[in-house]
Image (tube, grey):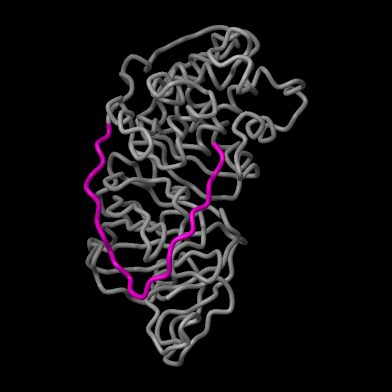
Amino acid sequence: MLKKLAIGALALMFLAPTLGLVSIGLVMNTAALAACTVSGSGVSVRNVPDSLQVTTADGYTFTLNKRQLTHAATIITVGSKIEGVNRDALKISLMAALTESTLRMLANTGTYPESGDYPNDGNGSDNDSLGLFQMRPQSGWGTVAELMDPEYQVAAFFGRPTGPNYPSPRGLLDIPGWESMGLGEVAQAVEVSAYPERYDNYAPVAEEILVTLTTGGASASATTPAGSLSNASNTSSKVVFPLPEGTWVQSDDFGPRIDPISGEQTTHHGLDFAAPDGTPILAAVDGVVTVAEFSDNWGGLIVIEHQLDNETVATAYAHMWQTGIHVTAGEPVVAGQHIGDVGSSGYSTGAHLHFEVRPGGTNGTAIDPAAWLNDHEAANLPEATTGPSNCEAGGTR
């Protein structure tokens, strides 16, 4: 649960390594949940659509796929059978799983190689965390085998004397007075995250999931999403800004500049946006992740390839902490999806996002991201100038 910050070494050149595809396994039979009804809290799962478009409290929209919604149905189904779990508790659990894993069952082969042998939706790298709620064996939540079982994780999250981890770590029902606490506050009390403010951002998403899965019918946005994960390779024209509104300031331009660390004349191949450490980084367009790794050069690096206006283009996002990468190579993503967190690793002077746009794909030659974002109505930024610029806040070469 607790985020551990790792500081990368300085480097002089940008490398663009690629990763092999991460195998993804289905955790459950989605058809079996399509008409599942449960009792206990009065909440019943009646429908699992193929996709659902949702919007966070800070106004960003993304699409959950069938697999993610199936995990949500598991949380509702298992939780509804536990005495003391009401609708608010279910909503809190969805908020927690959305924040911790984006409703994905994550292995962690870097710490536990055997975790990759269990059905999973990709590979995480946050300390020794596993699964939907990113629970840690070393913190006493359970064994690797137990935590790679989504139903076990749900039972552990809710806790109580009959729960698998009682009396410690505490589940939701083990927290005195949780009913009178804020929803995000309860999620934080269970998760003990380094970023407690994030859970409330997913409250409207959790509510939309509950309504959709328990009323027997998806919303209009669920049946006609702007971008579905199952269709991520199709041409898309939707472009969103890679950071939430109001969280950033532009700290360096694209083009010639004086390097803020070496003091030498160099060329900056992207834009830098200074933002608080841990600010969510958002996928700019529907696409497929081609790079998701931590290196000495650019710290945490994500590259996504998109089919945009019938052409291939890649976007790159750099300088995340190792624990701030939330996607894996080969994973489809949608515009606005939370893919990582702002950090300051690698060749960096402070917390910021270095953002690049590369026509042609992952290894294409970078162009001015400001012009590209403006052309696609995702921003109103000053475009590159011919003169040098200087980094006044968090930045990198």
Horizontal arrangement in the rendering, residue 357 relative to residue 344 (left or right) = left
Q: Position of residue 12 (x, y in %)?
A: 36, 75
Horizontal arrangement in the rendering, residue 291 relative to residue 88 (left or right) = left
Residue at the spot x=61%, y=44% of the render? 194
Residue 315 picture quarter:
bottom left
Magenta segment: 1-24
Residue 189 picture quarter:
top right
Instruction: Based on the picture, tell me whether residue 5 belongs to the magenta stretch.
Output: yes
Residue 368 higher or lower than 210, as above or below: below
Say which quadrant the N terminus sits in. Answer: top right
Horizontal arrangement in the rendering, residue 349 relative to residue 24 (left or right) = right
The residue lying furthest to the bottom in this view is 387
Residue at the spot x=51%, y=13% of the render? 44
Q: Main secondary structure of the magenta part?
A: loop
Residue 40 picture quarter:
top right
Residue 331 higher or lower than 206, as above or below: below
Q: Position of residue 382 (x, y in %)?
A: 50, 80
